Amino acid sequence: MMCDDARLLLHAYLDNELDAAQSVAIDRHMQGCAACAALHADYAQLHEGFARASLYRRAPATLRKAWSVEPVAPRATQVRRPPVALAMAAGFAAALLIAAPAWWYTLHRDTNQVVDEVVSSHIRSMQPQHLMDVVSTDQHTVKPWFAGKLDFSPHVKDLASQGFPLAGGRLDALDGHTVAALVYRRRLHVINLYQWPLSAPAAAPDVAQWRGYTVIRWTDGHMRFVAVSDISESELRQFVLAFQDDATSPLMR
Amino acid sequence: MPSDFRPSAATPRSAHFEACVLPHLDAAYNLARWLARDEADAQDVVQEAMLRAFRYFESFHGGDARVWLLAIVRNTFYSLRAKSASNDAHESFDDDAHVVIDEQPSPEARALLAVDVDALQTALAHLPHPLREAIVLRELEECSYKEIASITGQKIGTVMSRLARARERLRAELSTPFTEARRHDVR
Protein backbone atom coordinates (compact mmCIF):
# COMPACT_ATOMS: atom_id res chain seq x y z
CA MET A 1 0.00 0.00 0.00
CA MET A 2 1.18 3.48 -0.87
CA CYS A 3 1.24 6.28 1.66
CA ASP A 4 -1.29 8.29 -0.36
CA ASP A 5 -3.87 5.52 -0.07
CA ALA A 6 -3.00 4.92 3.54
CA ARG A 7 -3.45 8.59 4.43
CA LEU A 8 -7.09 8.43 3.42
CA LEU A 9 -7.85 4.94 4.69
CA LEU A 10 -6.21 5.82 8.00
CA HIS A 11 -9.35 7.76 8.93
CA ALA A 12 -11.68 4.94 8.06
CA TYR A 13 -9.37 2.68 10.05
CA LEU A 14 -9.65 5.00 13.03
CA ASP A 15 -13.43 5.09 12.68
CA ASN A 16 -13.77 1.30 12.48
CA GLU A 17 -15.16 1.55 8.99
CA LEU A 18 -12.72 -0.81 7.26
CA ASP A 19 -13.26 -4.47 6.64
CA ALA A 20 -10.84 -6.97 8.11
CA ALA A 21 -8.64 -7.23 5.02
CA GLN A 22 -8.23 -3.46 4.70
CA SER A 23 -7.53 -3.12 8.42
CA VAL A 24 -4.78 -5.68 8.15
CA ALA A 25 -3.34 -3.85 5.16
CA ILE A 26 -3.27 -0.58 7.12
CA ASP A 27 -1.76 -2.31 10.14
CA ARG A 28 0.94 -3.76 7.95
CA HIS A 29 1.62 -0.46 6.23
CA MET A 30 1.96 1.37 9.54
CA GLN A 31 4.42 -1.19 10.81
CA GLY A 32 6.73 -0.31 7.96
CA CYS A 33 5.93 3.40 7.67
CA ALA A 34 6.79 5.58 10.64
CA ALA A 35 5.25 8.69 9.08
CA CYS A 36 1.83 7.11 8.66
CA ALA A 37 2.05 5.55 12.11
CA ALA A 38 2.82 8.98 13.57
CA LEU A 39 -0.11 10.49 11.72
CA HIS A 40 -2.33 7.75 13.07
CA ALA A 41 -1.15 8.51 16.60
CA ASP A 42 -1.96 12.20 16.11
CA TYR A 43 -5.44 11.48 14.82
CA ALA A 44 -6.07 9.02 17.62
CA GLN A 45 -5.08 11.78 20.04
CA LEU A 46 -7.45 14.16 18.28
CA HIS A 47 -10.21 11.58 18.56
CA GLU A 48 -9.58 11.23 22.29
CA GLY A 49 -9.56 14.99 22.55
CA PHE A 50 -13.07 15.10 21.16
CA ALA A 51 -14.20 12.46 23.61
CA ARG A 52 -12.73 14.39 26.53
CA ALA A 53 -13.44 17.93 25.50
CA SER A 54 -17.16 18.10 26.26
CA LEU A 55 -17.95 19.91 23.04
CA TYR A 56 -21.39 18.32 22.84
CA ARG A 57 -24.08 20.99 23.06
CA ARG A 58 -27.30 19.78 24.64
CA ALA A 59 -30.66 21.31 23.84
CA PRO A 60 -31.65 24.05 26.27
CA ALA A 61 -34.55 23.32 28.60
CA THR A 62 -36.81 25.89 26.94
CA LEU A 63 -36.56 24.10 23.62
CA ARG A 64 -37.21 20.73 25.19
CA LYS A 65 -40.19 22.07 27.08
CA ALA A 66 -41.68 23.57 23.94
CA TRP A 67 -41.64 20.17 22.29
CA SER A 68 -42.73 17.94 25.10
CA VAL A 69 -46.42 17.24 24.56
CA GLU A 70 -46.83 16.30 28.17
CA PRO A 71 -44.33 15.59 30.90
CA VAL A 72 -43.36 12.27 29.29
CA ALA A 73 -41.88 10.62 32.28
CA PRO A 74 -42.25 13.18 35.04
CA ARG A 75 -39.56 11.32 36.88
CA ALA A 76 -37.23 11.97 33.98
CA THR A 77 -37.92 15.62 33.33
CA GLN A 78 -38.42 17.02 36.78
CA VAL A 79 -35.22 17.87 38.54
CA ARG A 80 -35.62 16.84 42.10
CA ARG A 81 -33.22 17.70 44.80
CA PRO A 82 -31.04 14.62 45.12
CA PRO A 83 -31.49 14.02 48.87
CA VAL A 84 -35.25 13.81 48.39
CA ALA A 85 -34.85 11.50 45.41
CA LEU A 86 -32.41 9.30 47.28
CA ALA A 87 -34.57 9.20 50.37
CA MET A 88 -37.55 8.22 48.29
CA ALA A 89 -35.58 5.59 46.43
CA ALA A 90 -34.31 4.17 49.71
CA GLY A 91 -37.80 4.15 51.15
CA PHE A 92 -39.15 2.47 48.07
CA ALA A 93 -36.37 -0.10 48.13
CA ALA A 94 -37.01 -0.84 51.80
CA ALA A 95 -40.72 -1.22 51.16
CA LEU A 96 -39.96 -3.62 48.34
CA LEU A 97 -37.68 -5.70 50.52
CA ILE A 98 -40.41 -6.05 53.10
CA ALA A 99 -43.01 -6.84 50.52
CA ALA A 100 -40.70 -9.00 48.41
CA PRO A 101 -42.68 -12.28 48.51
CA ALA A 102 -45.74 -10.54 47.12
CA TRP A 103 -43.77 -9.45 44.11
CA TRP A 104 -42.82 -12.91 42.99
CA TYR A 105 -46.19 -13.26 41.39
CA THR A 106 -45.65 -10.34 39.12
CA LEU A 107 -42.87 -11.97 37.12
CA HIS A 108 -44.72 -12.30 33.89
CA ARG A 109 -45.69 -8.78 33.29
CA ASP A 110 -46.09 -7.17 29.94
CA THR A 111 -42.57 -6.98 28.57
CA ASN A 112 -43.13 -3.58 27.00
CA GLN A 113 -43.93 -2.24 30.39
CA VAL A 114 -40.66 -3.62 31.69
CA VAL A 115 -38.71 -2.02 28.85
CA ASP A 116 -40.49 1.24 29.50
CA GLU A 117 -39.63 0.99 33.17
CA VAL A 118 -36.00 0.17 32.43
CA VAL A 119 -35.64 3.17 30.14
CA SER A 120 -37.36 5.45 32.66
CA SER A 121 -35.03 4.16 35.33
CA HIS A 122 -32.04 4.76 33.06
CA ILE A 123 -33.17 8.33 32.32
CA ARG A 124 -33.83 8.94 35.99
CA SER A 125 -30.39 7.64 36.85
CA MET A 126 -28.86 10.29 34.60
CA GLN A 127 -30.12 13.07 36.83
CA PRO A 128 -27.50 14.89 38.84
CA GLN A 129 -26.15 12.80 41.69
CA HIS A 130 -28.51 9.95 41.07
CA LEU A 131 -26.32 7.78 38.91
CA MET A 132 -24.23 6.03 41.51
CA ASP A 133 -24.39 5.24 45.20
CA VAL A 134 -20.95 3.70 45.17
CA VAL A 135 -18.42 5.30 42.87
CA SER A 136 -15.54 3.06 41.99
CA THR A 137 -13.89 1.55 39.00
CA ASP A 138 -12.81 -1.38 41.15
CA GLN A 139 -15.06 -4.41 41.01
CA HIS A 140 -13.74 -5.46 44.42
CA THR A 141 -15.14 -2.25 45.88
CA VAL A 142 -18.43 -2.27 44.06
CA LYS A 143 -19.37 -5.89 44.74
CA PRO A 144 -18.92 -5.80 48.54
CA TRP A 145 -20.91 -2.58 48.63
CA PHE A 146 -24.00 -4.53 47.64
CA ALA A 147 -23.51 -7.04 50.47
CA GLY A 148 -26.28 -6.70 53.01
CA LYS A 149 -28.27 -4.45 50.73
CA LEU A 150 -29.61 -7.22 48.52
CA ASP A 151 -30.75 -10.78 49.07
CA PHE A 152 -28.41 -11.95 46.33
CA SER A 153 -24.84 -11.34 45.28
CA PRO A 154 -24.65 -9.56 41.95
CA HIS A 155 -22.08 -10.34 39.27
CA VAL A 156 -19.70 -7.42 39.08
CA LYS A 157 -16.82 -7.12 36.68
CA ASP A 158 -14.79 -4.37 35.18
CA LEU A 159 -14.78 -4.39 31.38
CA ALA A 160 -12.31 -1.54 30.91
CA SER A 161 -10.13 -3.68 28.69
CA GLN A 162 -13.08 -4.14 26.34
CA GLY A 163 -13.79 -0.41 26.31
CA PHE A 164 -16.54 -0.42 28.91
CA PRO A 165 -14.99 0.76 32.18
CA LEU A 166 -16.97 0.13 35.34
CA ALA A 167 -17.96 3.40 36.97
CA GLY A 168 -19.95 2.33 40.00
CA GLY A 169 -23.20 0.90 41.22
CA ARG A 170 -26.42 1.64 43.03
CA LEU A 171 -29.60 0.04 44.25
CA ASP A 172 -32.65 0.40 42.08
CA ALA A 173 -36.13 -1.02 41.78
CA LEU A 174 -37.42 -2.63 38.62
CA ASP A 175 -40.38 -4.77 37.77
CA GLY A 176 -41.14 -5.13 41.45
CA HIS A 177 -37.66 -6.25 42.44
CA THR A 178 -34.89 -4.58 44.28
CA VAL A 179 -32.12 -4.83 41.75
CA ALA A 180 -28.43 -4.19 41.53
CA ALA A 181 -27.59 -1.53 38.97
CA LEU A 182 -24.05 -1.41 37.66
CA VAL A 183 -22.93 1.69 35.83
CA TYR A 184 -20.52 1.39 32.94
CA ARG A 185 -19.19 4.05 30.66
CA ARG A 186 -18.67 4.00 26.94
CA ARG A 187 -16.86 7.16 25.93
CA LEU A 188 -19.33 9.83 27.02
CA HIS A 189 -22.26 7.45 27.28
CA VAL A 190 -23.59 5.62 30.28
CA ILE A 191 -24.72 2.01 30.34
CA ASN A 192 -26.93 0.80 33.16
CA LEU A 193 -26.85 -2.93 33.78
CA TYR A 194 -29.60 -4.21 36.06
CA GLN A 195 -29.66 -7.68 37.53
CA TRP A 196 -31.85 -9.62 39.89
CA PRO A 197 -32.49 -13.29 40.61
CA LEU A 198 -35.16 -14.99 38.58
CA SER A 199 -36.10 -18.65 38.67
CA ALA A 200 -36.48 -19.15 34.97
CA PRO A 201 -34.51 -21.10 32.36
CA ALA A 202 -31.60 -19.34 30.65
CA ALA A 203 -32.74 -17.20 27.77
CA ALA A 204 -30.86 -15.72 24.85
CA PRO A 205 -30.62 -11.92 24.71
CA ASP A 206 -33.54 -10.10 23.17
CA VAL A 207 -33.28 -6.54 22.00
CA ALA A 208 -35.84 -3.75 22.23
CA GLN A 209 -35.74 -0.14 21.17
CA TRP A 210 -37.64 2.45 23.15
CA ARG A 211 -37.53 6.22 22.81
CA GLY A 212 -34.13 6.10 21.20
CA TYR A 213 -32.68 3.83 23.83
CA THR A 214 -31.62 0.25 23.33
CA VAL A 215 -32.55 -2.37 25.89
CA ILE A 216 -31.05 -5.87 25.87
CA ARG A 217 -32.41 -8.48 28.25
CA TRP A 218 -31.19 -11.95 28.95
CA THR A 219 -31.31 -14.62 31.62
CA ASP A 220 -28.35 -16.67 32.70
CA GLY A 221 -27.68 -18.77 35.76
CA HIS A 222 -30.98 -17.85 37.38
CA MET A 223 -30.21 -14.19 37.06
CA ARG A 224 -32.10 -11.73 34.95
CA PHE A 225 -29.95 -9.11 33.24
CA VAL A 226 -31.11 -5.95 31.56
CA ALA A 227 -28.69 -3.56 29.87
CA VAL A 228 -29.85 -0.14 28.72
CA SER A 229 -28.06 2.75 27.06
CA ASP A 230 -28.28 5.34 24.34
CA ILE A 231 -25.27 3.87 22.52
CA SER A 232 -25.93 2.05 19.26
CA GLU A 233 -27.45 -1.39 19.32
CA SER A 234 -24.28 -3.00 17.97
CA GLU A 235 -22.19 -1.43 20.73
CA LEU A 236 -24.61 -2.52 23.41
CA ARG A 237 -24.52 -6.05 21.98
CA GLN A 238 -20.75 -5.84 22.19
CA PHE A 239 -21.09 -4.85 25.83
CA VAL A 240 -23.43 -7.75 26.56
CA LEU A 241 -21.03 -10.17 24.86
CA ALA A 242 -18.13 -8.75 26.84
CA PHE A 243 -20.06 -9.19 30.06
CA GLN A 244 -21.10 -12.72 29.20
CA ASP A 245 -17.84 -13.91 27.68
CA ASP A 246 -15.42 -12.72 30.28
CA ALA A 247 -13.23 -15.72 31.02
CA THR A 248 -13.38 -15.12 34.74
CA SER A 249 -17.12 -15.09 34.57
CA PRO A 250 -19.16 -17.61 36.47
CA LEU A 251 -21.70 -17.09 33.71
CA MET A 252 -19.65 -19.12 31.29
CA ARG A 253 -21.44 -22.37 31.02
CA MET B 1 -40.74 31.85 13.48
CA PRO B 2 -43.89 30.38 15.03
CA SER B 3 -42.27 29.70 18.33
CA ASP B 4 -45.54 29.30 20.18
CA PHE B 5 -46.35 26.19 18.21
CA ARG B 6 -47.11 23.13 20.24
CA PRO B 7 -48.37 19.89 18.80
CA SER B 8 -51.70 19.03 20.33
CA ALA B 9 -51.40 16.45 23.04
CA ALA B 10 -54.46 14.50 22.11
CA THR B 11 -53.53 12.86 18.83
CA PRO B 12 -51.73 9.53 18.76
CA ARG B 13 -49.65 10.97 15.95
CA SER B 14 -48.06 13.53 18.20
CA ALA B 15 -47.44 10.93 20.88
CA HIS B 16 -45.75 8.76 18.26
CA PHE B 17 -43.78 11.77 17.02
CA GLU B 18 -42.70 12.52 20.52
CA ALA B 19 -41.59 8.96 21.18
CA CYS B 20 -39.62 8.75 17.92
CA VAL B 21 -38.19 12.21 17.49
CA LEU B 22 -37.93 13.90 20.87
CA PRO B 23 -35.15 11.63 22.18
CA HIS B 24 -32.99 13.10 19.42
CA LEU B 25 -33.52 16.73 20.37
CA ASP B 26 -30.03 16.95 21.86
CA ALA B 27 -28.53 15.56 18.67
CA ALA B 28 -30.53 18.06 16.62
CA TYR B 29 -29.43 20.95 18.78
CA ASN B 30 -25.81 19.85 18.84
CA LEU B 31 -25.63 19.75 15.05
CA ALA B 32 -27.50 23.06 14.70
CA ARG B 33 -25.32 24.68 17.32
CA TRP B 34 -22.11 23.69 15.58
CA LEU B 35 -23.40 24.64 12.15
CA ALA B 36 -24.79 28.00 13.26
CA ARG B 37 -22.10 28.68 15.88
CA ASP B 38 -24.64 30.73 17.81
CA GLU B 39 -27.12 29.71 20.49
CA ALA B 40 -30.07 31.79 19.36
CA ASP B 41 -29.63 30.82 15.72
CA ALA B 42 -29.28 27.18 16.68
CA GLN B 43 -32.56 27.33 18.62
CA ASP B 44 -34.27 28.88 15.61
CA VAL B 45 -32.91 26.18 13.35
CA VAL B 46 -34.03 23.38 15.68
CA GLN B 47 -37.44 24.96 16.19
CA GLU B 48 -37.98 25.23 12.45
CA ALA B 49 -36.55 21.74 11.85
CA MET B 50 -38.86 20.23 14.47
CA LEU B 51 -41.81 21.95 12.84
CA ARG B 52 -40.82 20.50 9.48
CA ALA B 53 -40.27 17.11 11.04
CA PHE B 54 -43.70 17.23 12.64
CA ARG B 55 -45.30 18.35 9.40
CA TYR B 56 -43.67 15.63 7.34
CA PHE B 57 -43.78 12.93 9.98
CA GLU B 58 -45.97 10.81 7.70
CA SER B 59 -43.04 10.56 5.30
CA PHE B 60 -40.96 8.92 8.01
CA HIS B 61 -41.40 5.20 7.54
CA GLY B 62 -39.46 3.75 10.41
CA GLY B 63 -35.71 3.45 10.16
CA ASP B 64 -33.36 5.62 12.15
CA ALA B 65 -35.26 8.65 13.47
CA ARG B 66 -32.01 10.36 14.44
CA VAL B 67 -30.62 10.23 10.91
CA TRP B 68 -33.96 11.42 9.56
CA LEU B 69 -34.12 14.34 11.99
CA LEU B 70 -30.48 15.35 11.54
CA ALA B 71 -30.95 15.48 7.77
CA ILE B 72 -33.88 17.84 8.33
CA VAL B 73 -31.84 19.97 10.75
CA ARG B 74 -29.06 20.22 8.23
CA ASN B 75 -31.37 21.17 5.36
CA THR B 76 -33.14 23.68 7.58
CA PHE B 77 -29.88 25.30 8.54
CA TYR B 78 -28.73 25.70 4.96
CA SER B 79 -32.09 26.97 3.75
CA LEU B 80 -32.40 29.50 6.60
CA ARG B 81 -28.85 30.58 5.97
CA ALA B 82 -29.46 31.04 2.26
CA LYS B 83 -32.51 33.18 3.09
CA SER B 84 -30.68 35.60 5.35
CA ALA B 85 -29.38 37.96 2.71
CA SER B 86 -26.59 39.37 4.79
CA ASN B 87 -24.65 36.18 4.39
CA ASP B 88 -22.21 36.04 1.55
CA ALA B 89 -24.63 34.13 -0.65
CA HIS B 90 -22.85 30.84 -1.04
CA GLU B 91 -19.82 29.50 0.61
CA SER B 92 -19.13 27.17 -2.23
CA PHE B 93 -17.06 24.21 -1.30
CA ASP B 94 -15.09 22.57 -4.02
CA ASP B 95 -13.98 19.15 -2.96
CA ASP B 96 -11.16 19.23 -5.48
CA ALA B 97 -9.88 22.58 -4.31
CA HIS B 98 -9.31 21.30 -0.82
CA VAL B 99 -6.77 18.73 -1.72
CA VAL B 100 -5.04 16.72 0.91
CA ILE B 101 -2.23 18.79 2.33
CA ASP B 102 1.04 17.22 1.44
CA GLU B 103 2.74 16.58 4.70
CA GLN B 104 6.40 15.91 5.07
CA PRO B 105 6.57 12.19 5.48
CA SER B 106 9.57 12.13 7.76
CA PRO B 107 8.79 11.14 11.34
CA GLU B 108 10.91 14.01 12.67
CA ALA B 109 8.39 16.45 11.20
CA ARG B 110 5.70 15.25 13.54
CA ALA B 111 4.42 18.11 15.60
CA LEU B 112 3.01 17.37 19.01
CA LEU B 113 -0.65 18.03 19.34
CA ALA B 114 -1.91 20.20 22.09
CA VAL B 115 -5.50 19.09 22.31
CA ASP B 116 -7.20 21.26 24.88
CA VAL B 117 -10.87 22.17 24.93
CA ASP B 118 -10.57 25.81 23.95
CA ALA B 119 -8.15 25.19 21.13
CA LEU B 120 -10.23 22.32 19.78
CA GLN B 121 -13.43 24.35 20.03
CA THR B 122 -11.88 27.28 18.17
CA ALA B 123 -10.33 25.08 15.52
CA LEU B 124 -13.63 23.27 15.01
CA ALA B 125 -15.58 26.52 14.71
CA HIS B 126 -13.16 27.69 12.03
CA LEU B 127 -13.64 24.73 9.72
CA PRO B 128 -15.72 25.32 6.60
CA HIS B 129 -19.29 24.08 7.00
CA PRO B 130 -18.96 20.92 4.87
CA LEU B 131 -15.97 19.76 6.89
CA ARG B 132 -17.43 20.87 10.20
CA GLU B 133 -20.68 19.00 9.77
CA ALA B 134 -18.82 15.84 8.85
CA ILE B 135 -16.52 15.93 11.85
CA VAL B 136 -19.31 16.94 14.28
CA LEU B 137 -21.48 14.08 13.08
CA ARG B 138 -18.59 11.66 13.37
CA GLU B 139 -16.85 12.71 16.59
CA LEU B 140 -19.67 14.20 18.64
CA GLU B 141 -22.71 12.41 17.28
CA GLU B 142 -20.76 9.19 16.66
CA CYS B 143 -22.50 8.53 13.37
CA SER B 144 -21.20 5.86 11.03
CA TYR B 145 -20.01 6.89 7.57
CA LYS B 146 -23.21 5.47 6.15
CA GLU B 147 -25.30 7.59 8.51
CA ILE B 148 -23.29 10.73 7.70
CA ALA B 149 -23.68 10.00 3.99
CA SER B 150 -27.40 9.65 4.48
CA ILE B 151 -27.70 12.84 6.54
CA THR B 152 -25.63 14.98 4.20
CA GLY B 153 -26.79 13.32 0.97
CA GLN B 154 -23.28 12.50 -0.10
CA LYS B 155 -21.41 9.43 -1.18
CA ILE B 156 -19.51 7.51 1.46
CA GLY B 157 -16.28 8.29 -0.40
CA THR B 158 -16.99 12.00 -0.08
CA VAL B 159 -17.70 11.59 3.61
CA MET B 160 -14.40 9.81 4.08
CA SER B 161 -12.36 12.42 2.24
CA ARG B 162 -14.09 15.29 4.03
CA LEU B 163 -13.41 13.70 7.39
CA ALA B 164 -9.79 13.28 6.34
CA ARG B 165 -9.57 16.96 5.39
CA ALA B 166 -11.33 18.08 8.53
CA ARG B 167 -8.89 16.17 10.69
CA GLU B 168 -5.90 17.35 8.72
CA ARG B 169 -6.99 20.94 9.28
CA LEU B 170 -7.65 20.39 12.96
CA ARG B 171 -4.32 18.69 13.32
CA ALA B 172 -2.57 21.57 11.58
CA GLU B 173 -4.33 24.13 13.78
CA LEU B 174 -3.62 22.24 16.97
CA SER B 175 -0.03 21.46 16.21
CA THR B 176 2.49 23.47 18.09
CA PRO B 177 4.92 25.34 15.84
CA PHE B 178 7.54 23.10 14.37
CA THR B 179 10.47 24.48 16.35
CA GLU B 180 8.64 24.27 19.64
CA ALA B 181 7.60 20.76 18.87
CA ARG B 182 11.18 19.80 18.31
CA ARG B 183 12.13 21.16 21.68
CA HIS B 184 9.52 18.98 23.34
CA ASP B 185 10.32 16.03 21.22
CA VAL B 186 12.30 13.87 23.56
CA ARG B 187 12.59 10.86 21.33
Image (spheres, coloured by chain):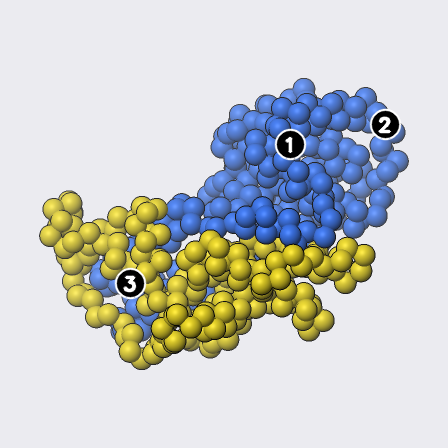
Chain colours: A blue, B yellow
Q: Amino acid at mark 3?
A: Arg
Quickly name the residue at label 1: A80
Q: Is residue B13 visible?
A: yes
Q: With respect to residue A156, does A207 lie above or below?
A: below
Is residue A153 at least partly visible in the picture? no
Q: Quadrant of residue B108?
A: bottom left
Identify the residue shown where x is 68% and y is 45%: A119
Tell me which residue sits at (49%, 58%) in the image.
B42
The residue pinned by badge 2 equals A101
CA separation, marks 3 and 1? Answer: 44 Å
Disc 3 crowd rating (10 Å Cα; few below 14, some 14-19, many 20+) is some
What residue did someone put label 3 on?
B169
Q: Quadrant of residue A224?
A: top right
Dot 1 falls on a residue whose secondary structure is loop
The residues tagged by marks 3 and 2 sit, at their Cα atoms, a distance apart of 63 Å
Tag 2: Cα neighbours inside 10 Å, few (<14), some, or many (≥20)?
few
Q: Image point 62% across, 28% down: which residue?
A: A81
The answer to whether the residues at label 3 and label 2 have Cβ atoms under 8 Å apart is: no
Foreground label between 3 and 1: 1
